[in-house]
Amino acid sequence: MTEEEFLASYDPRAFPPVAVTVDVVALTIRDAALNVLLVQRGSPPYEGAWALPGGFVRPAEDLYGAAARELAEETGLTTLRRVHLEQLASYGAPDRDPRMRVISVAYMALAPDLPDPASGTDARAAAWVPIALLGLPEATHEEPDRTRPARQRPGTTRRLAFDHTQILFDGLERARAKLEYSPLATSFVGEEFTIAELRAVYETVWGGTLHAGNFHRKVLSVPGFVESTGTSTERGGPRGGPRARLYRPGDARVLHPPLLRPAHEESVR
Amino acid sequence: MTEEEFLASYDPRAFPPVAVTVDVVALTIRDAALNVLLVQRGSPPYEGAWALPGGFVRPAEDLYGAAARELAEETGLTTLRRVHLEQLASYGAPDRDPRMRVISVAYMALAPDLPDPASGTDARAAAWVPIALLGLPEATHEEPDRTRPARQRPGTTRRLAFDHTQILFDGLERARAKLEYSPLATSFVGEEFTIAELRAVYETVWGGTLHAGNFHRKVLSVPGFVESTGTSTERGGPRGGPRARLYRPGDARVLHPPLLRPAHEESVR
DNA sequence: TAAATAGTGTCTATCAGACACTATGTG
DNA sequence: CACATAGTGTCTGATAGACACTATTTA
């Protein structure tokens, strides 16, 4: 029997059962800190442990729809307008779930400051958690190495259920990278925003501070990044300063030229 | 019954069966053209149609391993050394496979010029196919929009089985983008290569021509991109010219600064 | 010899980042 | 008033790209 004959005769229904889930790395900025939406598991395995919100993909539901549904359920939002949701990666180590074979398709969500999640009437809790509390490895300025299975990668702690620490890490790195060449920073702020608010997003997600004057000029010089509303804030800053002009997201989907993260020469190799 | 109680009681084993497959977008350069590995289907659905190589993920096999196995089976290679293989994205529209619910985890492989695939003894054919023959949409200089299901995106033809045209398109765009900021171009050439060979990779994948002198200086100025072997080619070019120095891949995993594609201002929005 | 190519030198327009400064607001 | 911030001007070092040129090899 050749390999091909074997495959042709392979009946997927005869497989041991496989389940497909979606897990969502939902990020928002609260109190000048990057937060991730976590839920506390109410049943084994990992009972009591915190995990990313997620669940099984239902029949006749596509992957994006499943992620959007899970996110809406946990945040209590009925509409996900102004929430950016994109596929991140899939995770399928054979033993990542002790119950059975589970392949998880992870999504990343970026949202403006949302209310506390409605933890509902059942035992599970849900909360926005500052990522600094999770003790993740530092930002690498590199994309995740997706050539090898996740569990063989170094530097990962395991504080969340399943392999969710790894998924969260990958989501954070994706968010940090996408701020460079996409206008996604506007997903973290309101419908109208000042350049200083946008700068605060970059500083929070990347860590560190950016030069206010240069950032201002740079943002306005990228075609289609932001678009003036013609209005200004009602008041100046809480500690003084002129009133700032307000902007809306522009129509660019890619930033040219990009806003590159400050020097990271040493982290390159 | 609340949503949460419903979920908690949900037994995944009671689901309609779900299958998980891997599909591989394997790219190589042959005769100065970008080629993709395709197989001709020998059984319904889409019998006789061309498709990406792929198959079901087996028990106790991780996703990367499944992709590597499928690639090795189709190329007839026992070792995948010098082949770059990374996860691309997952595709799960409910009706993407008429037989049953199938979620596919796609991988992208980049390889130096490989021999013709061993199409084996059975009915299926396998071949390297120049992508220019497939009539795909033009390069967009944008990353694929992963926020929405694939089939809602415009500009996709449907020449391959299932949604494989979309997967191929996404793989091509990933490859084009990664040449900018990663040293993956070296995956397309031999263990030792000249700068001109590397330039040919960029020109083939991106389309168009690059300035030879500036490209040469730029490549050598990126730390860790290439590393001199100290040797040169045995002969000059077929139509004259001095012998070229030979290089190996360096130890950089990210290119700083990146090699950006020539001006694409108009395609930004 | 003629032609092609590897590799280097040089000039210029552009840009990122540092620094400075003014205007406008708060307490 | 003291101080903070929005927004702009300006300078400098680095760089991408255009162009030119030399050296080397093949037919």
Image (spheres, coloured by chain):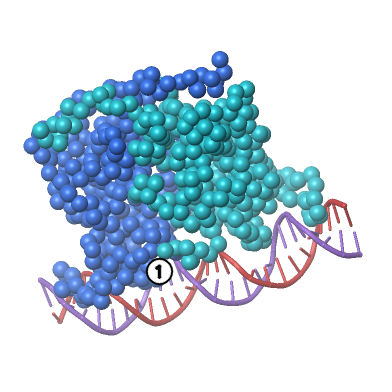
Chain colours: A cyan, B blue, C red, D purple
User: In this figure, which residue is indicated by the disc labeled 1?
Assistant: B223
For the N terminus of chain A, the quadrant is: top left
Q: Residue at x 51, y 19 (%)?
A: B6
Q: Residue furthest top?
A: B1
> What is the crowding at mark 1: few (fewer than 14 residues within 10 Å), some, or many (at least 20)?
some
Q: In x, y percent, where is residue B78?
A: 17, 49
Classify residue B180 as left or right of residue C15.
left
Classify residue A185 as left or right of residue B24.
right
Q: Residue at x 67, y 59 (%)?
A: A212
Q: Is residue A59 above or below residue A265?
A: above
Q: Residue furthest left?
A: B121
Q: Residue at x 80, y 47 (%)?
A: A235
Q: Nearer the viewer, residue A97 or B162?
A: A97
For residue A237, say whether it is visible.
yes
Mark 1 belongs to chain: B
For the C terminus of chain A, the quadrant is: bottom left
Q: In x, y percent, where is residue A53?
A: 52, 33
For residue B136, say whether it is visible.
no
Locate residue B257: give its quadrant: bottom left
Amino acid type, mark 1: Pro
Q: Residue at x 30, y 27 (%)?
A: A16
Classify residue B132 as left or right of residue A207.
left
Q: Nearer the viewer, residue A45 or A186?
A: A45
Locate residue B25: give its quadrant: top left
